[in-house]
Image (tube, rainbow, N blue to C red):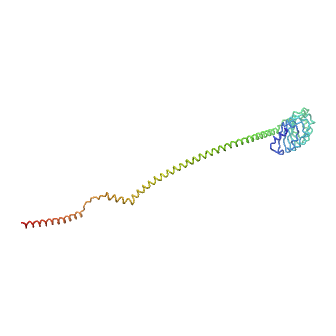
Amino acid sequence: MSNMEESIKREIGGREPDQVERLILDQAKCSDGLGQLAPFENLVSLSMNDASISSLSTMPALNNLATLKLSDNKIKNGLESLTKLEALEKLYLGGNQIPDLESLDPLKKLAKLEWLDLEGNPVTKVADYNKKVFDMLPALIVLDGCNRDGEELPDADDDDEDEDSDEDQEKAEGDEEEGDDDEDDEEDGDEDGGGDAAKADAGAGDDGDDDDDEEEAADDDEEEDEDEEDEEEESGEGMEEYTNYHQILGGDAEAYNEEEDDADFRPPEQEPNDLEIADEDDADLEGGDSVLGKRGALEDDEDEDGGSKR
C-alpha cells in the first residue's frame, strides 16, 4: 500500500468515497499520481500541500471541487490538467516552481476562479506581475492575499482549514476514545466478572446471614410462644382462683355460710317483754298453788295422823 493510499484510508475512515466532501492529504507523498482521487466525485475541498507532486497530468475530473491546495510541491507547468475542474474557485500554488506568465495561460479557462496564490514562485518576480495576472484572469478577485488595489483580504478558507484540522483532531480523539472505551469495557467486563463472583460470595454470605437471621427469628418466636404460654397459664390460674372465689360467693357460698352460722351463731339474749313476764307469773302461781296445796294437804294429813296418835 502506497503512502497516498494509507493517507486516504486514514482520512476517510469507514466512509465511502462518494460520501467524502473534504479531504486533506498534506505530506502524503503522491509520487504515484493522482488517479486514486477519481472515486471522490463529490469532493468539494482537496488539500495536498507538500505532497511531492511534480505533475498534474493524472488529475481526475472532479466536477464539484471548489478549493484546491497544492502549495509547496514541485509543479513547474502542466496547469492545463486543472481545466477539468470547472467548479474551481480557489487555487493555491504558492511555493512551487512556475517560471513565467505563459505557464498560467491555461487558468484562463477557469471561469469561476476568484482566488489565486502564487507566492514563492519565480513568476512573481515578473514586472507588473500583479496587474498582468489580474488582466489575464478577469474573474480573479484576490491574488496572493490582496485585491487589485493591493488591499490585503483575509482568507476565509484558512478558517475552513482550521475547522478541518479541528474535525480531524476530534475524529482522531474520538477514535482514541473509542479504543479507550473498548479497553474500559473489557476492564469493566473483567471487573464485572470479579464483581459477579464477589456478589456471588456476598450473596452466599447474605444467604448465611439470612439463615442466621431466620434462626434467630425462630428462636425469638419460640421465646415469645413460651412467654405467651406462661402468661396463659398464669392467666388460667388467676381465672381459676377468680372462678372459685365467685363460686364461693355464689351458690356454694350459701352452704358455706350456713355451716359457719351453725357453728358460730349465738343468739343474743333478749329482754322479756310484759306478756312473757305475766305468763311466767301465772305459771309460777299455778305451780305455787299446786305446791302449796300439796304442802297444805300433807300438813293436814300429818295433823290428822298426829291427833289420832295422841
Quadrant position of the C terminus in the picture = bottom left
Q: Residue furthest right?
A: 102
Examine the image and state in which quarter residue 159 appears: top right
* Foreground of the two, 292 or 89: 292
* Foreground of the two, 50 or 249: 249
Q: Position of residue 121 (x, y in %)?
A: 89, 33
Q: Position of residue 256 (x, y in %)?
A: 36, 58
Q: How many marks?
A: 0
Q: Position of residue 118 (x, y in %)?
A: 88, 35
Q: Residue furthest left?
A: 310
Quadrant position of the N terminus in the picture = top right
Horizontal arrangement in the rendering, residue 230 relative to residue 258 (left or right)? right
Q: Is residue 71 above or below residue 260?
A: above
* Foreground of the two, 56 or 142: 56
Horizontal arrangement in the rendering, residue 195 relative to residue 151 (left or right)? left
* Foreground of the two, 117 or 148: 117
Examine the image and state in which quarter residue 141 appears: top right
Examine the image and state in which quarter residue 282 appears: bottom left
Q: Position of residue 235 (x, y in %)?
A: 46, 53
